[in-house]
Image: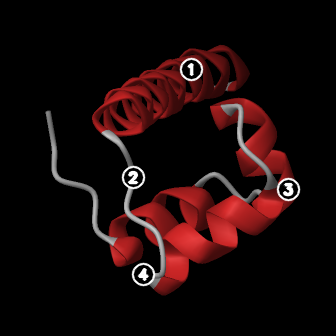
Amino acid sequence: MRNWTPEDIFNLRSKMNLSQPAFGDILGVTGNYVYLLEKGVKQASKTLMLLLDCVERQFKEKGKEGKKYEKKKSKKHL
């Protein structure tokens, strides 16, 4: 389990191109709570850190799938 810092949480949300409320919906918390996590006012619980690990892993896997799709797609157009 990764120790999520406020910067790590902000960076993941930014990479996913999500607002704080939208990211909160994924995590099961409010947008305001995401704001507090990113500012360092609140610390993520162990459960939330595990969930952040899962969200990050799924995001990375979807990115790889998208790249594979783009490679296949570009080969067809050649």
Q: Which mark is residue 21?
A: 3
In the rendered structure, which disc, 1 or 2, sits on the residue that comes first in sequence?
Answer: 2
Question: In which quadrant will I find the N terminus?
Answer: top left
Residue 53: image x %, image y %?
33, 32
* Residue ID at (58%, 26%): 66
The answer for how far apart the CA atoms under marks 1 and 3 are is 38 Å
Q: Which one is nearer the viewer's eye here, 10 or 76?
A: 10
Task: Check disc 4 and report its element: helix, strand or loop.
Answer: loop
The residue lying at 35 percent from left, 66 percent from top is: 8
- Give the labeled residue for mark 4: 40
Which amino acid type is marked by label 4?
Gly
The residue to which callout 2 is attached is 44
Residue shown at 39% from the left, 52% from the top = 44
Number of numbered callouts drawn: 4
Residue depicted at x 65% and y 62%: 34
Q: Secondary structure at mark 2?
A: loop
In the image, residue 38 above or below residue 72: below
Q: Tag on residue 75? A: 1
